[in-house]
Structures are given as structure tokens and as C-alpha cells.
Image (cartoon, coloured by chain):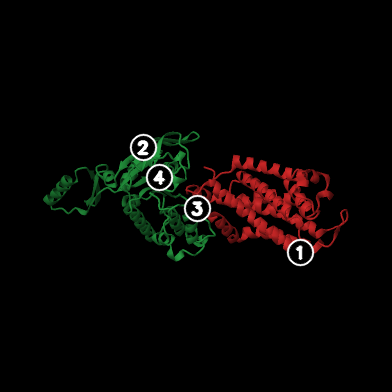
Chain colours: A red, B green
Amino acid sequence: MHELRTEQVLFWRNREAAFFTFFLPVIFFLVFGSIYGNSTITKEHLRAAPFLEAGMIGYGVASTAFAGLAITMVIRRESGVLKRVRATPLPPWTYLLAVLVSTFITFLVEAVLLIVLGRVLFSVAVPTRPLSLFVALVIGAGAFAAMGLGLTSVVRSAEGSSAVVNFVYLPMAIISGTFFTPKEYPTFLRVIADVLPLTYFTKLTRDVMVRHHHLWSESGSVGVVLLWGVVGIAAAIRGFRWQPRES
Amino acid sequence: MSAVSVTGLRKSYGAYEALRGIDFTIEPGEVFGLLGPNGAGKTTTVEILEGYRARNAGTVDVLGIDPQQSGSAWRERIGVMLQSSSLYPNLTPRESLQVFAGYYAKPRDVDEVVEIVGLAEKADDRVRTLSGGQKRRLDLALALVGDPELVFLDEPTTGFDPGARRTAWDTVRNLRALGKTILLTTHYLDEAEQLADRVAVLRDGVIVREGSPAELTGGIVETEIRFRRGGEDVVEHTKDATRRLHELTAEALARGEELEQLEVRRPTLEDVYLELTAE
């Protein structure tokens, strides 16, 4: 608990990171919601606003649990903080768990904020399947956080961390259709989108939030997200380091 | 039982041999200085003792435990100050200490530690606004906050102004007075001379000399006698300074000469160090 509190303080104190990972999806939701929130997705006779809201929760998992976590952990590794923590009696697993739970709390606050803003500004109904949504958020945050920790192993310096992470996550967010449906994308982009985990997580949030499906009726999407989570865990176990590379 | 005991310690990075079989022991309550130029193997040695690095050969015993097999209970008893600052930039020193104090079963009082390292005035400013020396003092404070028996200080005063160095030295002396065991690495000879009960000089991964500062400076380098005669500088080195000085002054008196600018210098640890670490 002590460490969890520390992690939350650390996150909100770092204004650049809090803006980049937490507020950016909120801002995108406000901007794009104002632009095309009231237009209609003809195929399903859905308003765009709820569709976008669920998409921004997808964007949020990528920015908080994946990009934000990866950048933070690279900076802590390279500045020696992780190494220093290892010299204390705090078990490393406790430390990592606190980091992960704190990341999830941040993401959860963001999802709630998006839902509230959607209700107030764009008259989007509150999700009817809160339990399914909550479990979906847990699964998504866990999988993307695992991938984020895995990604830290390929970043060599604190200076390069934002560049590398943005290079991975921004195209992913766009190709996976967090802003627009990927169904109308050209074939080659759809092929890429079809393997990306964010495509399936966004599909999951939309199925649960917009189409009122139960989580367990979407086992295909859940499976793909979890599979990527396992890939992330494997990468993290292989490559996560507590110290800068020895020269 | 010794607090630290190292025998035949070897460490290689690829083909490069950083430590080529070193032995030393540190007794409880002792301040042990590891002295040497950059690349001599000081940090490698300390980080092996702290449990960060695996050794290639030799035995290492720190507080009765092999650091490679250490756990939380062992880490309760050690304090670590790494060579480079390792802090959260967006916390204040007081918060940083509270965070780390929370990792230990019996931490010291945070305000007291702030006071000890002389950071009281800056205790509530963000770490990123501190100077390099102030950050190092916080690193030192973090090494002490768990109230450890054994403290590792890797170049603790690098970047300090003279006043801050004196304060840090007093802190180390106070720790010693409390019965703590301290392993200190340093470039600074005066620091080792001032603080260490015993010093080991490390060069190219080998300990080239070990002993108390007084032992190291006694009998190794000869006493230097300098003066001017007939407009020329004369420098003599002798192991028998009393006799030689008597001869010189007797001669001078007999000839009615003055030994201008006469100077008799005892070797300092610096002379020993320079001699030992010279290529």
C-alpha cells in the first residue's frame, strides 16, 4: 500500500507524463467527439460518439498501461532508481505489483472520466454491462502492461524511450481503429490491424459498451488480447532489467 | 567474526579482467577505504559485495552471508550509496526518505536523517531543483535511513564543495562512533586519510598496498629534504632523515653557509598513492 501510494504521487507529479498518457485520450475524445460525434455510422445505425468513447478507452490502455509504463520504467532503470530499490528489503515483486496496480488505477480513472464526459457532453448512455467492462479493462491493462514491460528491453537509453515507444504505439493506435472503424481501411492496413492486440481490445470495449454484449460472448477478442499478454510476459521475463546496461 | 571477508575475488567482463584475485577483510566498526584511480575495480568490488554483480571466482562473505544468495533480511542490514545519483526527481528529499524508510522494518527518523546530512533547508523542495552536491547528500541520507550495520559509500563526496565535504566527513565519523561498519571508495586521498581506519590501494584489479594510513606512509617513501645551495635547488630523499639533516646542517654551519629555503617533508598518502599507481 505504501508503495502504491508512492506510485500514484509519482505519476501525478510528473506533469508531462500525466498529460501525455492520461489527458491526451481525453482531449482527443473532446476534439473528435465535437467534430463527428453526432454523425451516424450507417451500417449499424450507431451514433459516432459512443463508438469513439469506447475507442478512446482503447487508446487510453495503449497510452497509460503500455506507452506510459514503458517510458517510466526505462527512465527509472537508466537513472538508477530501479537498481537502488533493489538494494532495499522491498521484494522486487512487490515493487512491480505496486507499479502495475497504480497503472491500472490511473487507467480506470481515465475510463470513468471518459464515460462521464461522454454522458455529459455527448449524451452517450452509461455502459449497461459494468462488470463485463471492468473485467475487460483488467485484462486489457494487464496485457498491455506486460507488453510495455517487455518493450523496455529494446530501449537502450532514457533519451530514446519516448521516441521508440511513440514509434510503436501511435501507429498502433491509429491502425487499430481507436478513432475510426478499421473496416473501411485499405487491405494492407487491415491485414496489419488484424494482428494488433489493440484492434481486439477496442473491438472488445465497443462490443461491451456500444453493442451491450457480455464479455464471455466475445471469447475470440479476449483470447487474442490474452495471447499478446503472454507474449508480453515472455518478453518481460527475458528482457526486463533493473540496471542500465553495463558498459 | 569479520563484517566483510573477501578471498581470491575475480571478475571478468569478456576478455577484460576487472579484478584479478583480491583479498581483504573489514572488521565490525571499522571504516575501510578502497582507494584507486578510475578503472581500478573499486565499483566492481563494491557492487559484488552489495549483491549486484556475480563474481567469477573467490569467496565473499558480507555480514555472514554470500551476497549472491542474499535476501530481504540481509538487505535490512546494509545501506547503499551508489556511485551515481539515483533519485525520483519529482519527490522532495523528505518524501524520498519517507518512501525508502517504508521499505525497512526499523528505519531511522526521517527528520533526524535530513538533519544529519545537512538537507534541512531543502527538505521540502523537489529533488530536481537540488544541486549535484545536495543530491549526493540525499543519496547518503537514503543509505542511512534503514539504520544499517554496514554502509557502502561509493565515491560519496564527489562534486561536493569543501564545506559540504567536511559535513559529510563528520557524518561518516558520527556513523563510526555509532559502531557502524563502513566501506568507502574514493579518489580523494585526504578523504581516505581523514576517515579510514585502513586503506587498500587498488590498481588494475589488484590490491597493491593495504594498511592504516600511517602504515602506508611510514617507511615506504623516504623523507624529502629540499633547500637551495649556490643558487641551485637540491632535493634529497633519505630513510634516515635525522642523521642526514644533522650532517647537512653541520656542514653548512662549518662553512658558514645558509641552507636557503630548507624544507623537510614527510610523505603524504598522496605520494604513496602516486608511487603505487604510477604506470
Tell me whether the residue at label 1 lies in contact with that at label 4, contact meaning CB atoms closer than 8 angstroms.
Answer: no
Give residue B86's mark. 3
Q: Residues within 10 Å of mark 1 (few under 14, many from 20)?
A: some
Tell me whether the residue at label 3 lies in contact with that at label 1, contact meaning CB atoms closer than 8 angstroms.
Answer: no
Residue type at tag 1? Arg
Same-chain check, marks 3 and 1: no
Location of mark 4 (residue) = B37
Q: CA separation, marks 4 and 2?
A: 18 Å
- Tag 2's secondary structure? strand
Give residue B23's mark. 2
Residue A74 in sight:
no
- Image quadrant where one finds the C terminus of chain B: top left
Is residue A14 shown left or right of residue A217? left
Residue B119 pos. (x, y %): 43, 62
Look at 47% across and 47% down and name the residue there: A87
Give residue A119's mark. 1
Query: Chain letter of disc 2?
Result: B
**Residue projecting furthest to the left:** B254
Q: Quadrant of residue A63?
A: bottom right
- Tag 4's secondary structure? loop
Same-chain check, marks 3 and 2: yes
Look at 81% across and 50% down and name the residue there: A182
Query: Chain letter of disc 1?
Result: A
- Tag 3's secondary structure? loop
Mark closer to the observer (1, 4): 1
Residue type at tag 4? Pro
Mark closer to the observer (3, 4): 3
Query: Chain letter of disc 3?
Result: B
Q: CA separation, marks 3 and 4?
A: 23 Å
